Image: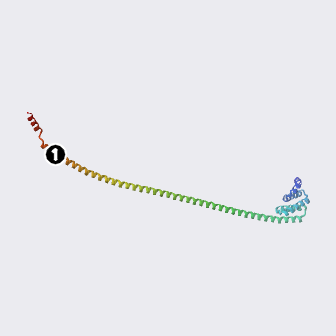
Amino acid sequence: QKAYAILKEIESYVRSTNDSYQLSTHCQNMGMALHKLNRNEEAIKFALESIKISSELKLNKSLKESYHLLSLIYNGTGNYKEAYKAVEKYAQINETVLNEDRIKSISEMEAKYENEKKQKRIERLKNEKQLSKVKEQRATAESRRKTSQLYFLLVVSILIFLLSAFVFRAYRQRKKANKVLSLQKFQIEKQRDELTVKNEIIEEKNNDIMDSIRYAERIQNSQLPTRSYIEKNLKRLRK
């Protein structure tokens, strides 16, 4: 009774919303409430209205429930013929609903499968892209490493060349300096030998001159009177 009162109170509001789905559900609830109050004639009207709305909107689940309600109401009134018809309709629609559910379930599974396939394909493409990126990064790193090695070898080669050039230049300069030193040594030795020869000639000449001087002194000394002779003659003259 209380449920019916509440439903009756909101009926005008439900009808004013022009929401057919909500109205179909409301009619089912009103039919069930009236059936429990044993007001089956009124309940039939609400059940039929719910069936009509559900049929128009192709709401098979709601239509199934409405036929189930109608079969209960007819059974309660003793109209077993109409109750049986309602049960048949219920069974047909229930089969349709089950088929729809199966189709929906299959569709959902197919959609889920396709989605999983899509996700796997996306993941595979993503992994392939990441792998390609990793390979690219590795190739770039390898290229940079080879370039660095090439630059290093180039720098080492240049340093070796410069060092070799420096060593060769130093060798040539040292060889040239040694040659100059050898020439200077030769010239110095030659000059020393020439000076030695000249010194020997000068010394020889000096010896010759000294010999001549000594010879002249001897001659001169042999011709001059002696000192005692001179003193003797001087004493004699004084007398």
Find residue 228 and report its image quarter: top left
Secondary element at image label 1: helix
Q: Nearer the viewer, residue 41 or 117?
A: 117
Q: Is residue 71 visible?
A: no
Q: Is 9 rendered above or below residue 94?
A: above
Q: Is residue 57 left or right of residue 236?
A: right
Q: Is residue 81 left or right of residue 129?
A: right
Q: Quadrant of the C terminus?
A: top left
Q: Is 232 rendered above or below residue 140?
A: above
Provide residue 97's location: percent of width, then percent of height: 80, 64
Provide residue 142's location: percent of width, then percent of height: 55, 59
Q: Residue furthest top?
A: 239
Q: Residues within 10 Å of mark 1 (few under 14, many from 20)?
A: few
Q: Is 154 rendered above or below residue 220?
A: below
Q: Nearer the viewer, residue 112 or 122?
A: 122
Question: What coloring was used for the rendering?
Answer: rainbow
Residue drawn at x 14%, y 44% is 220
Residue drawn at x 57%, y 59% is 140
Residue drawn at x 63%, y 61% is 129
Provide residue 215's location: percent of width, then percent of height: 16, 46
Q: Is residue 114 visible?
A: yes
Label 1 sits on residue: 216
Find residue 49 and report its image quarter: bottom right
Provide residue 80's location: percent of width, then percent of height: 89, 64
Query: Number of labelled discs?
Result: 1
Residue drawn at x 69%, y 63% is 118
Residue type (three-letter) at the residue carrying disc 1: Ala
